[in-house]
Amino acid sequence: MIPFRQLAALAAAAALATAAAGRPIPEAEALQPPTPARLAAVAAAAKQDGWGPQQADLRAAARLAYERDKLPAAEAWNHVRRWAELFAQTEAEFVPQWIAAVNAAQVGHPNMPSRYGTRPVPIGDVLAPELKLWLLGQTELSGEFHALVSPVDFLPRSFAILQELYAHDAAVFKKFPALAVAIALVYDVPPPPIWPHAQVTAEALPRRFPAPTAAFAWWAKQEQLGKTYHRLARLGPDELKFLVDVAAPFAELEWAQLVSNHPLGQLAGAYTMVRYRNDRLANRTPIWSGSSYALAEIMAAGGICADQAYFATQVGKARGVPTLLFSGAGNDGRHAWFGYLGADGKWKMDAGRYAEQRFVTGFARDPQTWREISDHELAFLGERFRDLPSFRQSRVHVAFAADFLATGLDRAAGTAARKAVNFERRNQAGWEFLLTAARREGRDAKAVESLLREAAAAFARYPDLELLYGKRLADSLRARGETSLADAELQRLAAKNRSGRSDLNVEQARDAVRRAIATQPLPQQLLAYNQAVDTFGRGAGVAFFDQVVAGFVEHLLRLGRRTEAQQALDRARRALRVEPKSQLAADFELLGKTVRETK
């Protein structure tokens, strides 16, 4: 029998749905977060008419609350509207947009299917009605989901995974909803062939994720057994996505729990559990030669830095610790290390990082989007300012700025975006919406440049982001003929980054050379390259060689200019710090041989 209270709730929801049919949500109700009865009424109406028709009333309620500065109510109504929007979108609408986003972000890879369905079926239909209703009422989880989801997430599969996990065990799903979201957003497409690193064959390490239900059940069980170093229910999906991207089978992770006794504060020690193979470095054999890449085999055979970093990341994941594998280029060689989420909620980025020499920065793959991220970007996440009430308010304003832009209300979008950055200067989405609104309003280039300067100043402590806005400012200045001002802005950033972030100077040098190749005749290309070498290459290392020297020399060879290619290589050799018998010295010799043998 259905309990009396449940019958009463169902009757109230049905009555509300009937009374509200074709009528907007009353003002008094809109100024408060939606009640369970209202959510049930929305779901009932959607079951009959579809989720699309529900959006207008939900948007009106959200905007009314927002205009009256009732942010908690506005946030809750807007989350419901956004769920309705996603539930209503069909495969035929979603897939072309998703493919365009993947291509624009350049995150497609050969392991992804070559064809995707485009049926005129709402992608939300895969979710059971009770799961949809539950999601509508989870304001905190909804905020995390909507803030994290990206245009390159394949939501038809993500929704299917959420349904699989909910159907498998609804009680455990509700206990670990953030873990479910992380799995749904990471396992939506297969991992790329270069993950977790490219120095092992597909035969030795198949690139595939476990079944979502198996992964969810395994980590939930490990926490229940007390084997995880983090309480998984306390982590958000933005952290848990770096846990669930596991490459080793769970049997190997259970083996790792037995052989590693490093507590969380000493997890960096897992890196040196694998002895270093100097012979592989000396013989220049970076690819794993064994037939198996099992953790036990790595530990028994020893390996180089990529193997040590991979081993350590899997040891961390076995203990419920989010981890990343980083690789980077230093002055005379390349290296790999790992990072992990510490007990204080801060990311530790230097595990194994300085085993050979000091490296400037490292790059890993975001398992949700498969784009490249730096350890400095992750440190931004590690500051945990997103947990502050000020950021929560900023996030609400960003959500409304996005909605206003989507419906052509550009001035309202600009106002909301300005409120967002006033609450939290580090909310990058707020700056992006503010710039978009300014352009759509027809603001002139000088006004947009003023916003770019303001954004660059807001991220003065974050060189990656300051450079991003500084380069956009320089591009705008150059487009309207202010070449000297554009050069001065880039020189200012280069001087600031010279001591602490030489990798960003390498990026600037690379961009300057690429811009010359794309827009200038050969004499100006050579001049731009020489200036880049003389300005940024003094004492630089492998990163500069990889991103500037090698690309330009190969470009000259394709043009048939072998003499100029040899001159470019010789100039770089004089400028860069080339230690005898180093990886960089070997790279110069190999490229020099290519130049000499080119006809």
Image (cartoon, helix red, strand yellow):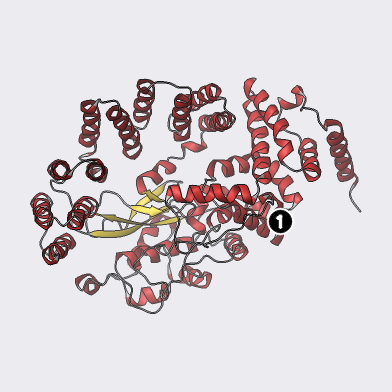
> Is label 1 in a helix, a strand or a loop?
helix
**100 is higher (above) or lower (below) than 397:** below
Along the line of sight, the residue nearer the viewer: 501 or 188? 188
Residue 349 percent coordinates (x, y):
35, 51
Q: Quadrant of the C terminus?
A: bottom left
**Left or right: 530, with 371 as reference point:** left
Q: Quadrant of the N terminus?
A: bottom right
Along the line of sight, the residue nearer the viewer: 251 or 66? 66
- Tag 1 residue: 170
Dot 1: within a 10 Å radius of its alpha carbon, few (fewer than 14), some, or many (20 or more) residues?
some
Residue 5 percent coordinates (x, y):
87, 43
**419 is higher (above) or lower (below) than 321:** above
Residue 473 percent coordinates (x, y):
32, 30
Quarter of the image for residue 142 reads top right
Quarter of the image for residue 573 reads bottom left
**Left or right: 253, with 167 as reference point:** left
Point 51% across, 70% down: residue: 249
Along the line of sight, the residue nearer the viewer: 529 or 231? 529
- The answer to whether one can see residue 240 in this image is yes
Quarter of the image for residue 457 reads top left
**598 is higher (above) or lower (below) than 99:** below
Residue 428 percent coordinates (x, y):
44, 34
Along the line of sight, the residue nearer the viewer: 213 or 59? 59
